[in-house]
Image (spheres, rainbow, N blue to C red):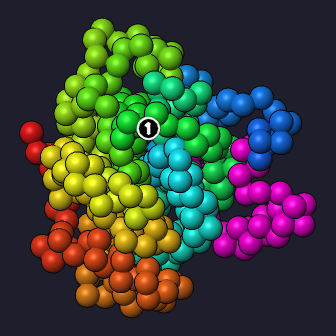
Amino acid sequence: MGGTRWSDDHYRDRAARLHKAKRSAFEYDEDIRERRVKAGVHELMDPAKMKNGIRESRDSEAHPNSNAVAVMFDVTGSMQRVPRILQKNLPTLMGLCLRNGYLDDPAILIGAIGDATCDLVPLQLGQFESGNEIENDLSRLYLEGGGGGQQMESYELALYFLARKAVMDSLEKRGKKGYAFIIGDEMPYKKVKRREVEKVFGETLQADIPIREIIAEAQEKFEIYFVLPNMTSYYNDPKILDCWRDLLGQYVLRLEDPAGISELIASTIGLSEEAVAYDNLSTDLGGAGANQSVADAVSAALADIAPNKIPKNSGLTSF
């Protein structure tokens, strides 16, 4: 996957077609809610149906130096707004990466996270895509909006995917890790459970995997960030923040204005790649169309780590 190029024109054309047809950008979710199809994971987003059991970020003629970026968000409760914000601002994300040079040949995978203890669809996974196919994966999401109400969601299954199911030329050929952004407002469960891996991925584990162990394994492949947007009361819950900081250290980013999710992803990458200086972020974001609230929120989210630069491929953990 990832052999095509992003086009703002194609993005606008698709938006116009959907508007004319009175369809949502999230067509599959709309079809489920209108009872045109049965509720469940789209077959192209089903972790149990991945070709060869993996998702691949590969180099191509169009993208000879592919860089994997996984964007995986909680879609329970009010967090369903996150994919809508991301879809609306995809041109900004791609523009900062491509036109501003924040990241060469980005290949973006879209993922959605629920709760494996109670949701019908606890994990959905797209492909690593470099062109407007990113929108296709967003359109196939089921925004279930469930969750168990115990301040935990199945983020550990997303981490399991990153650790064992993502294959990247950037790492295999060039020794360069990918970037992974998990966006949510709750805590992970303490273990990757055997029964849930069998249910979601259709494979058997020998034993449960402790959360710290799967994070360490995933960090061998990805720089992993947890983004906590100000969308629910959990934004100010010290238990949530302390949990993720204990697991990921400085790689936990609090975002005051959720409208800046795409800008935060791009800015974090740009700083890590040394493609932009922290002091120039607001100017770049303004040039990409971000308002002052978003620019300020992104700068604040990165303030604690940007002055000393995010270490490249550091594999930071707090074990």
Does 111 sit above or below residue 195? below
Q: Nearer the viewer, residue 125 or 131?
A: 125
Say left or right for 137 vs 48: right
The residue that appears at 24% across and 42% down in the rendered structure is 219
At label 1, counting other C-alpha atoms closer than 10 Å, the crowd grade (few under 14, some 14-19, many 20 or more) is few
Regarding residue 36, the answer to whether it shows in the image is yes
Quadrant of the rendered image containing residue 83: bottom right
Q: Nearer the viewer, residue 55 or 181?
A: 181
| Residue 116 covered by magenta stretch | no
Q: Position of residue 224 (x, y in %)?
A: 29, 50
| Residue 25 covered by magenta stretch | yes
Q: Nearer the viewer, residue 146 or 161?
A: 146
Does 19 sit above or below residue 279? above
Q: Position of residue 118 (x, y in %)?
A: 51, 26
**Among all residues in the image, which is located at the extreme right?**
21
**Among all residues in the image, which is located at the extreme left?**
319
Q: Amino acid at mark 1?
A: Gly
Say left or right for 88 vs 247: right
Q: Position of residue 6 (x, y in %)?
A: 62, 65
Residue under pointer 1: 149
The residue that appears at 56% across and 52% down in the rendered structure is 80
Q: How many marks?
A: 1
SS assignment at label 1? loop
Say left or right for 74 vs 18: left
Q: Position of residue 84 (x, y in %)?
A: 61, 60
Quarter of the image with the C terminus in it: top left
Quarter of the image with the N terminus in it: top right
The residue that appears at 35% across and 75% down in the rendered structure is 298
Say left or right for 143 vs 233: right
Regarding residue 125, the answer to whether it shows in the image is no
- Magenta residues? 1-29
